[in-house]
Amino acid sequence: GAVVSQHPSRVICKSGTSVKIECRSLDFQATTMFWYRQFPKKSLMLMATSNEGSKATYEQGVEKDKFLINHASLTLSTLTVTSAHPEDSSFYICSATAGVLEGYTFGSGTRLTVV
Amino acid sequence: GEDVEQSLFLSVREGDSSVINCTYTDSSSTYLYWYKQEPGAGLQLLTYIFSNMDMKQDQRLTVLLNKKDKHLSLRIADTQTGDSAIYFCAEIGNTGNQFYFGTGTSLTVIP
């Protein structure tokens, strides 16, 4: 079946640095990719939706200059957390779809810890 | 990685019960979850079950876990039009840090 690889699975970084998280669809072309952030009580908040070759659509309250999303190809989207702060520490998950009839495939998540 | 499978589509009539099924492969899962995604929204945690439980009921929602068959189901009683959404099952892997999601089941409730 469809596979999405998310890398890295865990990362620890210092405050003020930037971290890049990759989301790759391994065996299908993802026309749309989504980025989520997990909050306490395990709800996942949609941060942004990205379509290949166009700018990401950010949800209300998500800082686009802080969370840079690039969807440069049909198999790769990246999320860069810029100037990270401890409050950015969280679990980030991507998902990808080749179309609504194909379902959604999730990455296994990235645990970001900012110290 | 782990494999979590769901049917893509389900249609039910308003007032009937809906049963959404999920199968998984990781026998060491500790928690299994059901999330709901409404159009344009993020994933809302509906309920979860600990792996040593067989059943959990929460108002209209009933979760059944067959650990032997690695089968998880979500039953929604008296389904309403507001229940129309995509439902994802998910498990947390044995490292405690990784989620594995199903592909989502799109539930359509017919008035």
Image (tube, grey):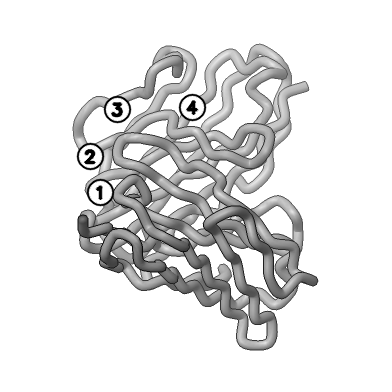
Q: Chain of mark 2?
A: A
Q: Amino acid type of disc 4?
A: Thr
**Cα distance, mark 4 to mark 1?**
18 Å
Disc 4 residue crowd, few under 14, some 14–19, many 20+, Cα 10 Å: some
Marks 4 & 2, CB-CB < 8 Å contact: no
Disc 3 residue crowd, few under 14, some 14–19, many 20+, Cα 10 Å: many
Q: Chain of mark 4?
A: A
Disc 4, SS:
strand
**B67 up-or-down from B43: above or below:** below
Disc 2, SS:
loop
Q: Chain of mark 3?
A: A
Image x and y of residue B73, in percent: 53, 71
Q: Earlier in the sequence, mark 3 or mark 1?
A: 3
Q: Which mark is residue A74?
A: 1
Q: Earlier in the sequence, mark 4 or mark 2?
A: 2
Q: Which mark is residue A56?
A: 3
Q: Are marks 4 and 2 on the same chain?
A: yes
Disc 3, SS:
loop
Q: Which is more toward the observer, A71 or B41?
A: B41
**Cα distance, mark 4 to mark 2?**
16 Å
Residue that carries the numbered disc 4 in the rendered image: A80
Q: Which is more toward the observer, B92 or A20?
A: B92
- The residue at 35%/52% (across/down) is B80
Disc 1, SS:
loop
Residue that carries the numbered disc 2 in the rendered image: A52
Q: Amino acid type of disc 3?
A: Ala
Q: Are marks 3 and 1 on the same chain?
A: yes
- The residue at 46%/62% (across/down) is B77
